[in-house]
Protein backbone atom coordinates (compact mmCIF):
# COMPACT_ATOMS: atom_id res chain seq x y z
CA UNK A 1 0.00 0.00 0.00
CA UNK A 2 1.14 3.55 -0.56
CA UNK A 3 2.72 5.60 2.15
CA UNK A 4 -0.27 7.93 2.15
CA UNK A 5 -2.70 5.21 3.18
CA UNK A 6 -0.43 3.90 5.88
CA UNK A 7 -2.15 3.96 9.19
CA UNK A 8 -1.44 2.20 12.44
CA UNK A 9 -5.06 1.93 13.54
CA UNK A 10 -6.06 -1.40 11.88
CA UNK A 11 -3.22 -3.31 13.44
CA UNK A 12 -4.19 -2.45 17.05
CA UNK A 13 -6.63 -5.32 17.72
CA UNK A 14 -4.28 -7.68 15.93
CA UNK A 15 -1.34 -6.50 18.03
CA UNK A 16 -3.38 -6.99 21.20
CA UNK A 17 -4.24 -10.50 20.05
CA UNK A 18 -0.59 -11.25 19.36
CA UNK A 19 0.62 -10.08 22.76
CA UNK A 20 -2.20 -11.77 24.66
CA UNK A 21 -2.54 -15.08 22.81
CA UNK A 22 0.85 -15.70 21.22
CA UNK A 23 3.56 -14.07 23.28
CA UNK A 24 1.99 -14.26 26.74
CA UNK A 25 1.09 -18.00 26.54
CA UNK A 26 4.61 -18.98 25.46
CA UNK A 27 6.12 -16.82 28.21
CA UNK A 28 3.71 -18.27 30.77
CA UNK A 29 4.46 -21.88 29.84
CA UNK A 30 8.17 -21.14 30.06
CA UNK A 31 7.68 -19.42 33.43
CA UNK A 32 5.55 -22.21 34.87
CA UNK A 33 8.05 -24.85 33.81
CA UNK A 34 10.34 -23.43 36.52
CA UNK A 35 7.71 -23.59 39.28
CA UNK A 36 7.04 -26.39 41.70
CA UNK A 37 3.67 -27.30 43.22
CA UNK A 38 3.93 -24.42 45.71
CA UNK A 39 4.77 -21.93 42.96
CA UNK A 40 8.42 -21.62 44.04
CA UNK A 41 11.28 -21.45 41.59
CA UNK A 42 12.79 -24.85 40.89
CA UNK A 43 14.76 -26.80 38.32
CA UNK A 44 13.28 -30.06 39.57
CA UNK A 45 10.81 -30.34 36.68
CA UNK A 46 13.62 -30.40 34.17
CA UNK A 47 15.65 -32.80 36.29
CA UNK A 48 12.54 -34.95 36.48
CA UNK A 49 11.96 -34.76 32.75
CA UNK A 50 15.42 -36.12 32.01
CA UNK A 51 14.97 -38.97 34.48
CA UNK A 52 14.49 -42.45 33.10
CA UNK A 53 10.69 -42.65 33.41
CA UNK A 54 10.02 -39.52 31.38
CA UNK A 55 12.82 -40.25 28.94
CA UNK A 56 11.31 -43.66 28.18
CA UNK A 57 7.90 -42.05 27.71
CA UNK A 58 9.39 -39.42 25.36
CA UNK A 59 11.23 -42.02 23.30
CA UNK A 60 8.11 -44.21 23.04
CA UNK A 61 6.10 -41.19 21.96
CA UNK A 62 8.66 -40.43 19.24
CA UNK A 63 8.72 -44.06 18.19
CA UNK A 64 4.92 -44.16 17.77
CA UNK A 65 4.93 -40.85 15.93
CA UNK A 66 7.62 -42.18 13.57
CA UNK A 67 5.69 -45.40 12.87
CA UNK A 68 2.48 -43.46 12.30
CA UNK A 69 4.18 -40.98 9.97
CA UNK A 70 5.86 -43.79 8.03
CA UNK A 71 2.66 -45.73 7.39
CA UNK A 72 0.65 -42.61 6.62
CA UNK A 73 3.25 -41.62 4.02
CA UNK A 74 3.44 -45.14 2.60
CA UNK A 75 -0.32 -45.21 2.01
CA UNK A 76 -0.81 -41.56 1.03
CA UNK A 77 1.92 -41.12 -1.57
CA UNK A 78 0.55 -43.67 -4.06
CA UNK A 79 -2.96 -42.36 -3.43
CA UNK A 80 -1.90 -38.80 -4.19
CA UNK A 81 -0.04 -39.98 -7.28
CA UNK A 82 -3.01 -41.93 -8.60
CA UNK A 83 -5.30 -38.98 -7.86
CA UNK A 84 -3.26 -36.69 -10.11
CA UNK A 85 -3.78 -39.22 -12.92
CA UNK A 86 -7.58 -39.26 -12.70
CA UNK A 87 -9.71 -37.31 -15.13
CA UNK A 88 -11.68 -35.16 -12.68
CA UNK A 89 -8.84 -34.92 -10.20
CA UNK A 90 -10.14 -31.93 -8.26
CA UNK A 91 -13.47 -33.63 -7.69
CA UNK A 92 -11.76 -36.79 -6.45
CA UNK A 93 -9.51 -34.68 -4.25
CA UNK A 94 -12.53 -33.05 -2.62
CA UNK A 95 -13.95 -36.51 -1.99
CA UNK A 96 -10.70 -37.51 -0.29
CA UNK A 97 -10.78 -34.34 1.82
CA UNK A 98 -14.42 -34.60 2.97
CA UNK A 99 -13.66 -37.25 5.62
CA UNK A 100 -11.09 -34.86 7.09
CA UNK A 101 -13.89 -32.35 7.73
CA UNK A 102 -15.71 -34.82 9.93
CA UNK A 103 -15.08 -34.17 13.59
CA UNK A 104 -12.11 -36.15 14.84
CA UNK A 105 -14.02 -37.40 17.86
CA UNK A 106 -16.71 -38.98 15.71
CA UNK A 107 -14.19 -40.84 13.55
CA UNK A 108 -12.42 -42.11 16.64
CA UNK A 109 -15.73 -43.15 18.16
CA UNK A 110 -16.56 -45.15 15.02
CA UNK A 111 -13.48 -47.27 15.59
CA UNK A 112 -14.60 -48.17 19.09
CA UNK A 113 -17.44 -50.04 17.37
CA UNK A 114 -15.44 -51.33 14.41
CA UNK A 115 -12.56 -52.75 16.44
CA UNK A 116 -14.71 -54.02 19.30
CA UNK A 117 -15.03 -57.66 20.25
CA UNK A 118 -18.31 -58.00 18.31
CA UNK A 119 -17.42 -55.54 15.57
CA UNK A 120 -17.14 -56.21 11.83
CA UNK A 121 -13.37 -56.79 11.85
CA UNK A 122 -13.72 -59.58 14.38
CA UNK A 123 -16.71 -60.97 12.48
CA UNK A 124 -14.51 -61.10 9.38
CA UNK A 125 -11.71 -62.81 11.29
CA UNK A 126 -14.17 -65.34 12.61
CA UNK A 127 -15.47 -66.27 9.15
CA UNK A 128 -11.85 -66.72 8.12
CA UNK A 129 -11.48 -69.17 10.96
CA UNK A 130 -9.62 -67.07 13.52
CA UNK A 131 -10.64 -66.52 17.10
CA UNK A 132 -12.06 -63.08 17.85
CA UNK A 133 -9.57 -60.89 19.72
CA UNK A 134 -9.96 -57.67 21.60
CA UNK A 135 -8.25 -55.17 19.32
CA UNK A 136 -9.28 -52.12 21.26
CA UNK A 137 -6.88 -50.84 23.89
CA UNK A 138 -3.80 -52.07 22.04
CA UNK A 139 -1.02 -50.08 20.42
CA UNK A 140 -1.98 -51.67 17.09
CA UNK A 141 -5.44 -50.10 17.19
CA UNK A 142 -3.93 -46.78 18.23
CA UNK A 143 -1.60 -46.71 15.21
CA UNK A 144 -4.40 -47.86 12.88
CA UNK A 145 -6.82 -45.12 13.95
CA UNK A 146 -4.23 -42.34 13.90
CA UNK A 147 -2.99 -43.37 10.43
CA UNK A 148 -6.59 -43.38 9.23
CA UNK A 149 -7.14 -39.88 10.56
CA UNK A 150 -3.94 -38.40 9.12
CA UNK A 151 -4.19 -39.89 5.60
CA UNK A 152 -6.18 -36.98 4.05
CA UNK A 153 -3.85 -34.40 5.68
CA UNK A 154 -0.84 -36.20 4.20
CA UNK A 155 -2.41 -36.61 0.74
CA UNK A 156 -3.19 -32.92 0.37
CA UNK A 157 0.34 -31.41 0.27
CA UNK A 158 1.75 -34.38 -1.71
CA UNK A 159 -1.05 -34.04 -4.25
CA UNK A 160 -0.18 -30.34 -4.53
CA UNK A 161 3.47 -30.94 -5.35
CA UNK A 162 2.75 -33.91 -7.65
CA UNK A 163 0.21 -31.82 -9.52
CA UNK A 164 2.81 -29.13 -10.17
CA UNK A 165 5.35 -31.67 -11.42
CA UNK A 166 6.21 -31.19 -15.08
CA UNK A 167 5.16 -34.45 -16.79
CA UNK A 168 7.68 -33.97 -19.57
CA UNK A 169 10.48 -34.61 -17.05
CA UNK A 170 8.98 -38.01 -16.35
CA UNK A 171 8.63 -38.78 -20.06
CA UNK A 172 12.21 -37.63 -20.63
CA UNK A 173 13.48 -39.99 -17.93
CA UNK A 174 11.55 -42.90 -19.43
CA UNK A 175 12.73 -42.07 -22.96
CA UNK A 176 16.30 -42.00 -21.75
CA UNK A 177 15.88 -45.54 -20.51
CA UNK A 178 15.13 -45.16 -16.80
CA UNK A 179 12.95 -47.88 -15.33
CA UNK A 180 9.69 -47.01 -13.60
CA UNK A 181 11.30 -47.36 -10.20
CA UNK A 182 14.35 -45.29 -11.23
CA UNK A 183 12.09 -42.57 -12.58
CA UNK A 184 10.25 -42.47 -9.29
CA UNK A 185 13.35 -42.60 -7.12
CA UNK A 186 15.47 -40.11 -9.06
CA UNK A 187 12.96 -37.78 -10.70
CA UNK A 188 9.45 -37.83 -9.23
CA UNK A 189 10.24 -38.24 -5.54
CA UNK A 190 13.03 -35.62 -5.33
CA UNK A 191 10.84 -33.11 -7.16
CA UNK A 192 7.93 -33.64 -4.78
CA UNK A 193 9.97 -33.71 -1.60
CA UNK A 194 8.51 -30.38 -0.44
CA UNK A 195 5.02 -31.89 -0.38
CA UNK A 196 6.32 -34.91 1.51
CA UNK A 197 8.00 -32.63 4.04
CA UNK A 198 4.78 -30.68 4.68
CA UNK A 199 2.95 -33.97 4.98
CA UNK A 200 5.42 -35.22 7.57
CA UNK A 201 5.06 -31.95 9.44
CA UNK A 202 1.28 -32.19 9.65
CA UNK A 203 1.49 -35.80 10.82
CA UNK A 204 4.50 -36.06 13.10
CA UNK A 205 3.87 -33.11 15.43
CA UNK A 206 0.18 -33.93 16.05
CA UNK A 207 1.09 -37.60 16.48
CA UNK A 208 3.38 -36.62 19.34
CA UNK A 209 0.74 -34.53 21.03
CA UNK A 210 -2.48 -36.52 20.64
CA UNK A 211 -4.15 -37.38 23.88
CA UNK A 212 -7.79 -38.00 23.10
CA UNK A 213 -7.23 -41.01 20.84
CA UNK A 214 -4.80 -42.60 23.26
CA UNK A 215 -7.47 -42.45 25.94
CA UNK A 216 -10.38 -43.69 23.82
CA UNK A 217 -8.65 -46.26 21.63
CA UNK A 218 -5.44 -47.25 23.36
CA UNK A 219 -6.93 -47.17 26.86
CA UNK A 220 -3.84 -45.68 28.52
CA UNK A 221 -1.59 -48.36 26.94
CA UNK A 222 0.09 -45.67 24.90
CA UNK A 223 1.32 -42.52 26.60
CA UNK A 224 2.31 -39.72 24.27
CA UNK A 225 3.79 -36.36 25.18
CA UNK A 226 0.28 -34.94 24.72
CA UNK A 227 -1.24 -37.44 27.14
CA UNK A 228 1.43 -36.58 29.69
CA UNK A 229 0.72 -32.84 29.40
CA UNK A 230 -3.03 -33.39 29.74
CA UNK A 231 -2.49 -35.62 32.75
CA UNK A 232 -0.21 -33.14 34.53
CA UNK A 233 -2.54 -30.22 33.89
CA UNK A 234 -5.98 -31.72 34.38
CA UNK A 235 -5.49 -34.80 36.55
CA UNK A 236 -2.35 -34.37 38.66
CA UNK A 237 -2.77 -30.59 38.81
CA UNK A 238 1.00 -30.22 38.47
CA UNK A 239 1.15 -27.32 36.02
CA UNK A 240 4.91 -26.95 36.45
CA UNK A 241 5.68 -30.44 35.19
CA UNK A 242 3.05 -30.14 32.45
CA UNK A 243 4.64 -26.88 31.31
CA UNK A 244 8.08 -28.48 31.24
CA UNK A 245 6.83 -31.18 28.87
CA UNK A 246 5.08 -28.46 26.82
CA UNK A 247 8.34 -26.49 26.55
CA UNK A 248 10.03 -29.65 25.31
CA UNK A 249 7.24 -30.22 22.76
CA UNK A 250 7.58 -26.62 21.53
CA UNK A 251 11.34 -27.10 21.09
CA UNK A 252 10.80 -30.32 19.15
CA UNK A 253 8.25 -28.54 16.99
CA UNK A 254 10.69 -25.73 16.20
CA UNK A 255 13.38 -28.28 15.28
CA UNK A 256 11.01 -30.18 12.99
CA UNK A 257 9.86 -26.94 11.37
CA UNK A 258 13.47 -25.99 10.72
CA UNK A 259 14.27 -29.42 9.33
CA UNK A 260 11.25 -29.57 7.01
CA UNK A 261 10.99 -25.97 5.86
CA UNK A 262 8.32 -23.54 6.94
CA UNK A 263 5.20 -24.62 5.10
CA UNK A 264 2.08 -24.59 7.19
CA UNK A 265 -0.04 -27.13 8.90
CA UNK A 266 -3.08 -28.48 7.07
CA UNK A 267 -5.25 -29.50 9.95
CA UNK A 268 -5.44 -29.92 13.65
CA UNK A 269 -5.78 -33.13 15.46
CA UNK B 1 -11.82 -42.38 -13.54
CA UNK B 2 -9.84 -42.47 -16.69
CA UNK B 3 -7.95 -44.77 -18.99
CA UNK B 4 -4.67 -43.22 -17.84
CA UNK B 5 -4.97 -45.40 -14.76
CA UNK B 6 -4.12 -49.06 -14.74
CA UNK B 7 -6.55 -51.56 -13.27
CA UNK B 8 -4.34 -51.92 -10.21
CA UNK B 9 -4.33 -48.15 -9.77
CA UNK B 10 -8.10 -47.99 -9.95
CA UNK B 11 -8.40 -50.82 -7.44
CA UNK B 12 -6.02 -49.04 -5.05
CA UNK B 13 -7.97 -45.78 -5.25
CA UNK B 14 -11.27 -47.60 -4.84
CA UNK B 15 -9.89 -49.33 -1.76
CA UNK B 16 -8.71 -45.97 -0.34
CA UNK B 17 -12.14 -44.44 -0.79
CA UNK B 18 -13.71 -47.49 0.81
CA UNK B 19 -11.36 -47.27 3.80
CA UNK B 20 -11.85 -43.53 4.23
CA UNK B 21 -15.63 -43.65 4.06
CA UNK B 22 -16.40 -47.02 5.66
CA UNK B 23 -16.04 -45.88 9.30
CA UNK B 24 -18.25 -42.85 8.66
CA UNK B 25 -20.98 -44.89 6.98
CA UNK B 26 -20.66 -47.59 9.62
CA UNK B 27 -21.33 -44.97 12.24
CA UNK B 28 -24.31 -43.61 10.31
CA UNK B 29 -25.76 -47.07 9.62
CA UNK B 30 -25.88 -47.96 13.30
CA UNK B 31 -27.68 -44.73 14.14
CA UNK B 32 -30.73 -46.57 12.72
CA UNK B 33 -30.17 -49.73 14.76
CA UNK B 34 -32.92 -50.60 17.20
CA UNK B 35 -30.38 -52.51 19.31
CA UNK B 36 -28.14 -50.67 21.70
CA UNK B 37 -24.65 -51.39 20.41
CA UNK B 38 -22.57 -50.85 17.28
CA UNK B 39 -22.66 -54.52 16.31
CA UNK B 40 -25.42 -56.85 15.19
CA UNK B 41 -27.91 -54.66 13.34
CA UNK B 42 -31.38 -55.57 14.62
CA UNK B 43 -34.00 -53.49 12.86
CA UNK B 44 -34.56 -50.01 11.54
CA UNK B 45 -35.55 -47.28 13.96
CA UNK B 46 -35.44 -43.52 14.25
CA UNK B 47 -35.65 -43.60 18.03
CA UNK B 48 -32.03 -42.45 18.50
CA UNK B 49 -32.85 -39.32 16.54
CA UNK B 50 -35.88 -38.80 18.71
CA UNK B 51 -33.54 -39.14 21.71
CA UNK B 52 -31.26 -36.43 20.32
CA UNK B 53 -34.09 -33.99 19.82
CA UNK B 54 -35.74 -34.86 23.14
CA UNK B 55 -32.51 -34.22 25.04
CA UNK B 56 -32.62 -30.48 25.70
CA UNK B 57 -29.14 -30.52 27.19
CA UNK B 58 -27.77 -32.00 23.97
CA UNK B 59 -29.67 -29.46 21.85
CA UNK B 60 -28.26 -26.63 23.97
CA UNK B 61 -24.75 -28.04 23.46
CA UNK B 62 -25.34 -28.26 19.70
CA UNK B 63 -26.55 -24.66 19.57
CA UNK B 64 -23.67 -23.50 21.78
CA UNK B 65 -21.20 -25.24 19.48
CA UNK B 66 -22.63 -23.50 16.42
CA UNK B 67 -22.82 -20.17 18.25
CA UNK B 68 -19.18 -20.39 19.36
CA UNK B 69 -18.14 -21.32 15.80
CA UNK B 70 -19.99 -18.41 14.18
CA UNK B 71 -19.06 -15.80 16.79
CA UNK B 72 -15.42 -16.83 17.07
CA UNK B 73 -15.24 -17.02 13.27
CA UNK B 74 -16.61 -13.49 13.03
CA UNK B 75 -14.25 -12.07 15.67
CA UNK B 76 -11.25 -13.86 14.12
CA UNK B 77 -12.20 -12.61 10.64
CA UNK B 78 -12.37 -8.98 11.79
CA UNK B 79 -9.09 -9.10 13.75
CA UNK B 80 -7.34 -11.21 11.13
CA UNK B 81 -8.38 -9.05 8.18
CA UNK B 82 -7.30 -5.86 9.96
CA UNK B 83 -4.10 -7.65 10.98
CA UNK B 84 -3.34 -8.66 7.40
CA UNK B 85 -3.88 -5.05 6.27
CA UNK B 86 -1.58 -3.97 9.10
CA UNK B 87 1.13 -6.48 8.16
CA UNK B 88 1.07 -5.37 4.53
CA UNK B 89 1.48 -1.74 5.60
CA UNK B 90 4.64 -2.60 7.54
CA UNK B 91 7.53 -1.56 5.31
CA UNK B 92 10.47 -2.84 7.33
CA UNK B 93 11.20 -6.35 6.00
CA UNK B 94 12.57 -7.65 9.30
CA UNK B 95 9.46 -6.51 11.18
CA UNK B 96 7.15 -7.94 8.57
CA UNK B 97 8.94 -11.28 8.69
CA UNK B 98 8.84 -11.33 12.50
CA UNK B 99 5.12 -10.53 12.54
CA UNK B 100 4.42 -13.33 10.06
CA UNK B 101 6.47 -15.83 12.06
CA UNK B 102 4.65 -14.91 15.26
CA UNK B 103 1.38 -15.11 13.34
CA UNK B 104 2.09 -18.74 12.43
CA UNK B 105 2.99 -19.86 15.95
CA UNK B 106 -0.58 -20.89 16.82
CA UNK B 107 -1.06 -22.67 13.50
CA UNK B 108 1.87 -24.99 14.00
CA UNK B 109 1.63 -25.39 17.78
CA UNK B 110 0.19 -28.67 19.04
CA UNK B 111 -3.36 -28.20 20.33
CA UNK B 112 -2.51 -29.58 23.73
CA UNK B 113 0.15 -26.89 24.21
CA UNK B 114 -2.26 -24.16 23.09
CA UNK B 115 -4.91 -25.50 25.45
CA UNK B 116 -2.56 -25.74 28.42
CA UNK B 117 -1.06 -22.27 27.90
CA UNK B 118 -4.51 -20.67 27.46
CA UNK B 119 -5.63 -22.38 30.66
CA UNK B 120 -2.73 -20.76 32.51
CA UNK B 121 -3.55 -17.41 30.89
CA UNK B 122 -7.24 -17.45 31.79
CA UNK B 123 -6.55 -18.62 35.32
CA UNK B 124 -3.95 -15.92 35.89
CA UNK B 125 -6.16 -13.07 34.72
CA UNK B 126 -8.93 -14.54 36.84
CA UNK B 127 -11.36 -15.24 34.00
CA UNK B 128 -14.10 -17.74 34.72
CA UNK B 129 -13.83 -20.82 32.53
CA UNK B 130 -16.88 -21.33 30.35
CA UNK B 131 -18.50 -19.81 27.29
CA UNK B 132 -16.31 -16.69 27.23
CA UNK B 133 -13.00 -18.54 27.61
CA UNK B 134 -13.95 -21.05 24.92
CA UNK B 135 -15.11 -18.27 22.58
CA UNK B 136 -11.92 -16.25 23.10
CA UNK B 137 -9.71 -19.31 22.64
CA UNK B 138 -11.43 -20.28 19.40
CA UNK B 139 -11.21 -16.74 18.07
CA UNK B 140 -7.54 -16.65 19.12
CA UNK B 141 -6.47 -19.81 17.29
CA UNK B 142 -8.48 -18.85 14.18
CA UNK B 143 -6.97 -15.36 13.74
CA UNK B 144 -3.72 -16.56 12.07
CA UNK B 145 -5.52 -18.69 9.48
CA UNK B 146 -7.66 -15.69 8.49
CA UNK B 147 -4.47 -13.63 8.11
CA UNK B 148 -2.98 -16.30 5.85
CA UNK B 149 -6.12 -16.39 3.71
CA UNK B 150 -6.39 -12.61 3.34
CA UNK B 151 -2.69 -11.78 2.92
CA UNK B 152 -2.21 -13.16 -0.64
CA UNK B 153 -5.24 -11.18 -1.84
CA UNK B 154 -3.76 -7.99 -0.38
CA UNK B 155 -0.38 -8.68 -1.93
CA UNK B 156 -1.80 -9.20 -5.41
CA UNK B 157 -3.79 -5.94 -5.18
CA UNK B 158 -2.37 -3.06 -7.17
CA UNK B 159 -1.31 -0.11 -4.99
CA UNK B 160 -2.13 2.25 -7.86
CA UNK B 161 -5.83 1.62 -7.17
CA UNK B 162 -5.45 3.02 -3.66
CA UNK B 163 -3.44 5.96 -4.92
CA UNK B 164 -6.10 6.63 -7.53
CA UNK B 165 -8.87 6.54 -4.92
CA UNK B 166 -6.93 8.89 -2.63
CA UNK B 167 -6.17 11.27 -5.54
CA UNK B 168 -9.85 11.33 -6.40
CA UNK B 169 -10.59 12.50 -2.87
CA UNK B 170 -11.56 9.33 -1.08
CA UNK B 171 -11.01 9.32 2.66
CA UNK B 172 -8.99 6.53 4.26
CA UNK B 173 -12.21 4.99 5.45
CA UNK B 174 -13.59 5.04 1.91
CA UNK B 175 -10.42 3.44 0.62
CA UNK B 176 -10.77 0.64 3.13
CA UNK B 177 -14.48 -0.04 2.72
CA UNK B 178 -14.90 0.67 -0.99
CA UNK B 179 -11.56 -0.34 -2.53
CA UNK B 180 -9.58 -2.67 -0.30
CA UNK B 181 -12.32 -4.79 1.29
CA UNK B 182 -14.18 -5.58 -1.95
CA UNK B 183 -10.90 -6.60 -3.58
CA UNK B 184 -9.91 -9.00 -0.81
CA UNK B 185 -13.44 -10.33 -0.25
CA UNK B 186 -12.72 -13.91 -1.46
CA UNK B 187 -9.86 -14.13 1.03
CA UNK B 188 -12.10 -12.90 3.83
CA UNK B 189 -14.79 -15.48 2.98
CA UNK B 190 -12.20 -18.25 2.88
CA UNK B 191 -10.77 -17.10 6.22
CA UNK B 192 -14.20 -17.00 7.86
CA UNK B 193 -14.99 -20.45 6.55
CA UNK B 194 -11.69 -21.89 7.76
CA UNK B 195 -12.18 -20.27 11.16
CA UNK B 196 -15.60 -21.92 11.51
CA UNK B 197 -14.27 -25.34 10.58
CA UNK B 198 -11.35 -24.95 13.01
CA UNK B 199 -13.79 -24.08 15.76
CA UNK B 200 -16.20 -26.94 14.99
CA UNK B 201 -13.38 -29.43 14.77
CA UNK B 202 -11.54 -28.42 17.90
CA UNK B 203 -11.47 -30.73 20.83
CA UNK B 204 -8.16 -30.36 22.66
CA UNK B 205 -8.11 -26.61 23.27
CA UNK B 206 -11.77 -26.56 24.31
CA UNK B 207 -11.19 -29.50 26.64
CA UNK B 208 -8.62 -27.44 28.56
CA UNK B 209 -10.50 -24.14 28.83
CA UNK B 210 -14.11 -25.26 29.09
CA UNK B 211 -14.47 -25.57 32.85
CA UNK B 212 -17.44 -27.41 34.31
CA UNK B 213 -20.65 -25.75 33.23
CA UNK B 214 -20.07 -25.33 29.50
CA UNK B 215 -19.58 -27.96 26.82
CA UNK B 216 -19.19 -28.17 23.08
CA UNK B 217 -20.13 -31.12 20.93
CA UNK B 218 -16.57 -32.49 20.74
CA UNK B 219 -16.11 -32.42 24.50
CA UNK B 220 -19.55 -33.91 25.05
CA UNK B 221 -18.94 -36.76 22.60
CA UNK B 222 -15.63 -37.43 24.34
CA UNK B 223 -17.26 -37.85 27.71
CA UNK B 224 -20.07 -39.95 26.20
CA UNK B 225 -17.58 -42.16 24.36
CA UNK B 226 -15.52 -42.69 27.51
CA UNK B 227 -18.47 -44.28 29.22
CA UNK B 228 -19.08 -46.64 26.28
CA UNK B 229 -21.21 -46.79 23.18
CA UNK B 230 -24.50 -44.90 23.03
CA UNK B 231 -26.23 -44.89 19.67
CA UNK B 232 -27.34 -41.32 20.37
CA UNK B 233 -23.77 -40.38 19.43
CA UNK B 234 -24.27 -42.18 16.11
CA UNK B 235 -27.41 -40.16 15.46
CA UNK B 236 -25.51 -36.96 16.23
CA UNK B 237 -22.72 -38.08 13.89
CA UNK B 238 -25.13 -38.52 11.02
CA UNK B 239 -26.61 -35.08 11.62
CA UNK B 240 -23.13 -33.54 11.87
CA UNK B 241 -22.01 -35.31 8.69
CA UNK B 242 -24.98 -33.94 6.77
CA UNK B 243 -24.42 -30.46 8.21
CA UNK B 244 -20.74 -30.68 7.20
CA UNK B 245 -21.69 -31.56 3.63
CA UNK B 246 -24.12 -28.65 3.49
CA UNK B 247 -21.50 -26.20 4.82
CA UNK B 248 -18.83 -27.44 2.39
CA UNK B 249 -21.26 -27.28 -0.53
CA UNK B 250 -22.34 -23.81 0.58
CA UNK B 251 -18.74 -22.68 0.78
CA UNK B 252 -17.99 -23.89 -2.76
CA UNK B 253 -21.14 -22.23 -4.00
CA UNK B 254 -20.19 -18.89 -2.40
CA UNK B 255 -16.57 -18.98 -3.63
CA UNK B 256 -17.63 -20.00 -7.13
CA UNK B 257 -20.12 -17.17 -7.23
CA UNK B 258 -17.47 -14.75 -5.96
CA UNK B 259 -15.04 -16.01 -8.60
CA UNK B 260 -17.67 -15.65 -11.31
CA UNK B 261 -18.46 -12.12 -10.13
CA UNK B 262 -14.76 -11.30 -10.12
CA UNK B 263 -14.38 -12.62 -13.64
CA UNK B 264 -17.33 -10.48 -14.69
CA UNK B 265 -15.77 -7.36 -13.15
CA UNK B 266 -12.45 -8.05 -14.83
CA UNK B 267 -14.07 -8.70 -18.23
Image (cartoon, coloured by chain):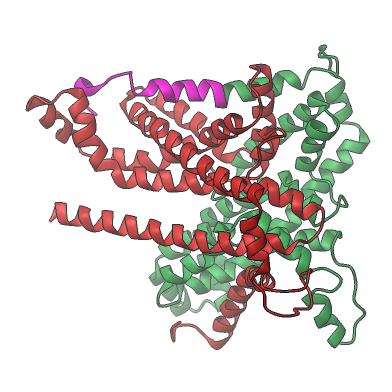
Chain colours: A green, B red
Examine the structure image and report whether residue A28 is included in the region drawn in magenta.
no
Examine the structure image and report whether residue A8 is included in the region drawn in magenta.
yes
| Residue at the top extreme of this rendering | A40
Residue at x 64%, y 56% (from the top left corner): B54
In the rendered structure, the answer to whether residue B121 lies left or right of residue B92 reads right
Total marks shown come to 0
Image quarter of the C terminus of chain B = bottom left
In the rendered structure, the answer to whether residue A48 lies left or right of residue A86 reads right
Dominant secondary structure of the residues highlighted in magenta in the image: helix
Residue at x 54%, y 82% (from the top left corner): B10
Q: Position of residue A220 (x, y in %)?
A: 86, 49
Q: Based on the displayed image, in which of its 4 quarters is residue B28 positioned?
A: bottom right
User: Which one is nearer the viewer's eye here, A194 or B7?
Assistant: B7
In the rendered structure, the answer to whether residue B50 lies left or right of residue A126 reads left
Q: Based on the displayed image, in which of its 4 quarters is residue B15 positioned?
A: bottom right
Residue at x 69%, y 56% (from the top left corner): A69
Considering only vertical position in the picture, is A196 above or below A80? above
Q: Is residue B156 visible?
A: no
User: Which one is nearer the viewer's eye here, B201 or A86?
Assistant: B201
Q: Is residue B202 visible?
A: yes
User: Which one is nearer the viewer's eye here, A69 or B94?
Assistant: A69
Q: Position of residue B259 (x, y in %)?
A: 26, 56
Q: Position of residue B50 (x, y in %)?
A: 64, 63
In the rendered structure, the answer to whether residue A192 lies left or right of residue A57 reads left
| Residue at the front extreme of this rendering | B54
Residue at x 50%, y 38% (from the top left corner): B142
Q: Position of residue A223 (x, y in %)?
A: 83, 46
Q: Based on the displayed image, in which of its 4 quarters is residue B251 positioned?
A: bottom left
Magenta segment boundaries in residue numbering: A1-21
Considering only vertical position in the picture, is A214 above or below A91? above
Amino acid sequence: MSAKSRSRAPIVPYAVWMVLFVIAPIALVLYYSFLDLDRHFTLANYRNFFSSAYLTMTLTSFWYAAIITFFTLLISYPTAYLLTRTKHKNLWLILIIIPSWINLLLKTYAFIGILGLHGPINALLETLGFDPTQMLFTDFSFILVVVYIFIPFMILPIFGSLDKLDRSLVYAARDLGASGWDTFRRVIFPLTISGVKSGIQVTFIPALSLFMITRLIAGNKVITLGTAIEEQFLVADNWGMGSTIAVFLILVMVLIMMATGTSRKGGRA
Amino acid sequence: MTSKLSLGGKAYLALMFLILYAPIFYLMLYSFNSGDSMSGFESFTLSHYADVFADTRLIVILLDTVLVALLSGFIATVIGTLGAIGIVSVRNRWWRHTLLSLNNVLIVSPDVVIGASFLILFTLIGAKLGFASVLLSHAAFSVPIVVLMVLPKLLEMKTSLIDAALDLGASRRDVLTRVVLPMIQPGIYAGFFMAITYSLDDFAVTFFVTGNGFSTLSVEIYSMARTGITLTVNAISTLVFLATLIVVAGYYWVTNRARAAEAEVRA
